[in-house]
C-alpha cells in the first residue's frame, strides 16, 4: 500500500511540473507575439526616410532624415520663387507646337482677405505646393492681390508680364535641425507687352525653409500634366513655411526666429501687397 501511494505521488508531481512548464511556454509565446505585433506597428507608422542630396538633388544615402545640401536649398528657393512670381499670361509649353503657339493662361481664382476673388497664374498655383500647408493659403491670397488683372488680358495693348530677377541668394543658415534661413535679394519687374514700359519693385525677402516628407505619385502613368507638375514640386523634400522682409543692412549673423524682429535702421523691401 505504501509503495502504491508513493507511485501515485510521483506521477502527480510529474504531471504538475509538465502542466506548469506548458503554461509557461504558452505565456512566453504570447509575449513574443505581442512584441512582434508592436514592432510591426512601429514600422507601419514610421515616416518614409529622406536621403542626403547632392547639389543636383539626387539622393545618395539614408544618413539623416533632416540633412539637405546648401546648394539644394538654394536651387529649391530659386526655382520656387521664380515660378511663383513670373507671369507671362501663357501656359508652359508641353509640346513642340505649343512652343511656337503657347496656350493662354486662364488663371485660377483665389479668395482674398477682402472677401472677393482674384486670379493668379497657373504657374504660381503649382509653385505654391512648395509651401507648407498652413502658410500656403494665406500666401496665395497675397499673391492674388499682387497679380495685375492685365496679365490675363487678351488685348495686346493692355497685357502685362512679370518676372522675378534674383540678384543674390545668401548661403542657408541652419536655425534648428532640419530648418534654414535664406536671404534673397531680387527685383520684381512688371512690363507692358506693347511699348515695353516696365516697373521695377525691390523684392528682398527672408525665407524660412524646412525639410519635408515626400510620397511619390501612386498613379504616375495616369496623371495629368498638372498633377505631375505638383508632384515634381514636392520631390525636393523641402518646403517654405514663412517669408519676411529682408533688412539689407543685416549682417545675417542673427539667426533668431522671433517674428517680432524688425529692421529698425536700414532699408527694407516693400510689403508683398501692392
Image: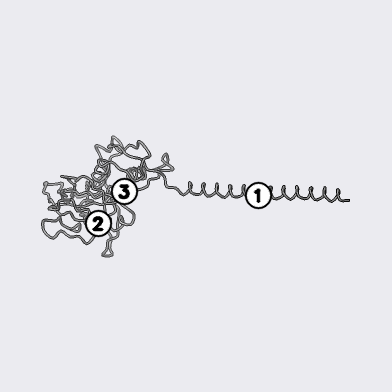
Residue 28 percent coordinates (x, y): 61, 48
Residue 162 percent coordinates (x, y): 19, 48
Residue 11 percent coordinates (x, y): 79, 48
Label 1 element class: helix
Could you tell which of marks 3 and 1 lies nearer the N-terminus? Answer: 1
| Residue at which label 3 appears | 178
Identify the residue shown where x is 21% and y is 51%: 151
In the picture shown, does residue 60 fall above or below 107?
A: above
| Residue at which label 1 appears | 24
* The C terminus sits in image quarter: bottom left
Query: Residue extending furthest bottom?
Result: 114
Identify the residue shown where x is 28% and y is 41%: 69
Residue 191 percent coordinates (x, y): 15, 48
Could you tell which of marks 2 and 3 lies nearer the N-terminus? Answer: 3
Crowd rating for badge 2 (residues with CA inside 10 Å; few <14, some 14–19, many 20+): few
Give the Cα distance between marks 3 and 1.
48 Å
| Residue at which label 2 appears | 257
Viewer-nearest of discs 1 and 2: 1
Viewer-nearest of discs 3 and 1: 1
> Taking 237 as reference, is 257 left or right?
left
Q: Nearer the viewer, residue 73 or 162?
A: 73
Quick check: marks 3 and 1 in contact, CB under 8 Å? no
Amino acid at each position: 500500500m505504501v509503495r502504491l501511494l508513493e507511485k501515485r505521488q510521483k506521477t502527480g508531481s510529474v504531471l504538475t511540473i509538465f502542466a506548469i512548464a506548458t503554461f509557461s511556454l504558452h505565456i512566453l509565446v504570447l509575449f513574443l507575439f505581442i512584441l512582434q505585433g508592436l514592432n510591426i506597428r512601429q514600422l507601419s507608422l514610421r515616416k518614409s526616410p529622406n536621403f542626403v542630396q547632392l547639389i543636383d538633388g539626387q539622393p545618395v544615402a539614408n544618413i539623416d532624415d533632416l540633412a539637405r545640401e546648401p546648394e539644394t536649398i538654394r536651387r529649391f528657393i530659386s526655382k520656387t520663387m521664380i515660378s511663383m512670381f513670373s507671369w507671362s499670361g501663357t501656359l508652359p509649353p508641353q509640346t513642340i507646337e505649343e512652343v511656337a503657339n503657347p496656350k493662354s493662361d486662364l488663371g485660377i481664382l483665389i479668395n482674398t482677405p477682402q472677401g472677393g476673388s482674384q486670379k493668379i497664374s497657373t504657374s504660381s498655383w503649382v509653385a505654391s505646393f512648395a509651401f507648407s500647408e498652413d502658410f500656403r493659403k494665406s500666401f496665395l491670397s497675397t499673391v492674388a492681390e499682387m497679380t495685375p488683372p492685365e496679365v490675363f488680358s487678351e488685348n495686346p495693348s493692355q497685357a502685362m508680364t512679370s518676372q522675378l530677377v534674383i540678384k543674390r541668394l545668401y548661403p542657408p543658415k541652419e536655425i534648428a535641425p532640419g530648418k534654414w534661413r535664406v536671404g534673397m535679394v531680387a527685383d520684381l519687374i512688371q512690363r507692358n507687352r506693347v511699348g515695353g514700359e516696365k516697373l521695377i519693385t525691390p523684392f528682398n525677402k527672408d525665407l524660412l525653409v524646412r525639410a519635408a516628407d515626400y510620397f511619390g505619385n501612386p498613379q504616375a502613368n495616369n496623371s495629368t500634366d498638372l498633377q505631375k507638375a505638383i508632384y515634381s514640386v514636392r520631390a525636393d523634400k523641402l518646403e517654405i513655411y514663412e517669408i519676411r522682409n529682408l533688412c539689407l543692412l543685416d549682417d545675417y549673423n542673427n539667426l533668431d526666429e522671433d517674428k517680432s524682429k524688425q529692421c529698425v535702421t536700414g532699408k527694407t523691401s516693400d510689403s508683398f501687397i501692392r
